[in-house]
Image (cartoon, rainbow, N blue to C red):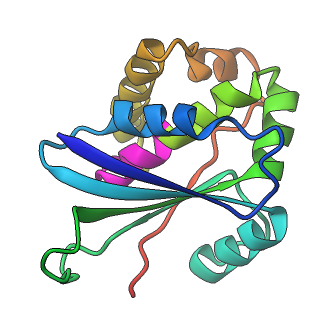
Amino acid sequence: MTLEVAVQYAVPRAGVPAARRLHAAARAAWRGTGAAGVTLRIVDAEEGHALNHAFRGRDRATNVLSFPVPEDMPLPPGDGPAGLGDIVLCDPVLRREAEEQGKRLGDHYTHMVVHGMLHLQGFDHQDATEAAVMEALETRVLARLGVADPYRAAASDPAASRECERDVHGV
C-alpha cells in the first residue's frame, strides 16, 4: 500500500503544521491496498470561500473540502499512482476553530486531514448511521496518531463545530 501525498501552500507556512505531520495523517487514514496519490492544499479564507461558493453554493469559507477524483476519469498510462483526490484545508478557519474549541492547531489539522481522507474513500456522515461509522474510524486513526477524540470534546461543547464539506468535481 502506497500513498503519495503532495502538500501545496497558498498561505505562509509559518505556524502551519509540518508537512510530515500532514503526510502521516493522510497515510494513517488510507485504507486502500494499491498505490494512490492525494494533494493537500492549504488555502487562505478568500480561496476557501471561493471554492466553497463555487462547489457547494455556500457563501463562506469552511474548514475542509474533499474533491474525489471521478471514478470514470481516465488517467494517462505511466503517470504514477491513481489519483485519489484533493483535500483543501482553510488555514484561517482551522486556526479559529482550534482556538474556539481549545484544541492544538496541529491536532485539528490532523483531524481534518483524516476526515478528508475518509471522504475521498467514500465515507460520509449524511445520516446518524454513516456519521457513527465515520466518527469511529476517525477516532481510531487519530488515537494511533496520538490525537484525542475530537467528538468527545464536541459532545461536551455544543458550540464546537463538526462541520466539513464534501464535494465531487469534474475536470
Residue 124 visible to an observer of this rendering: no
On the image, the x and y values in percent for residue 13 come to: 77, 48
**Which residues are drawn in magenta?**
114-125
The quadrant of the rendering that contains the C terminus is bottom left
**Corner quadrant of residue 30:** top left
Outermost residue, bottom side: 171
Along the viewing direction, whichever of 101 and 42 lies nearer the viewer: 42
Residue at screen point 45% across, 31% down: 24
Along the viewing direction, whichever of 163 and 21 lies nearer the viewer: 21
The quadrant of the rendering that contains the N terminus is top left
Q: What is the total number of numbered labels drawn onto the structure image?
A: 0
Residue at screen point 82% across, 54% down: 12
On the image, the x and y values in percent for residue 147 come to: 56, 16
Residue at screen point 32% across, 57% down: 37
Magenta stretch containing residue 116, yes or no? Answer: yes
Residue at screen point 22% across, 74% down: 79
Residue 13 visible to an observer of this rendering: yes
On the image, the x and y values in percent for residue 109 come to: 64, 37
Outermost residue, front side: 78
Instruction: Using residue 8 as the reference point, say whether residue 117 is left or right of it.
Output: left
Task: Using the image, determine if residue 76 lies above or below residue 117.
Answer: below
Instruction: Using residue 136 as the reference point, say whether residue 55 is left or right of it.
Output: right
Instruction: Using residue 58 as the reference point, say whether residue 2 is left or right of it.
Output: left
Instruction: Using residue 18 as the reference point, say whether residue 171 is left or right of it.
Output: left
On the image, the x and y values in percent for residue 111 come to: 56, 32
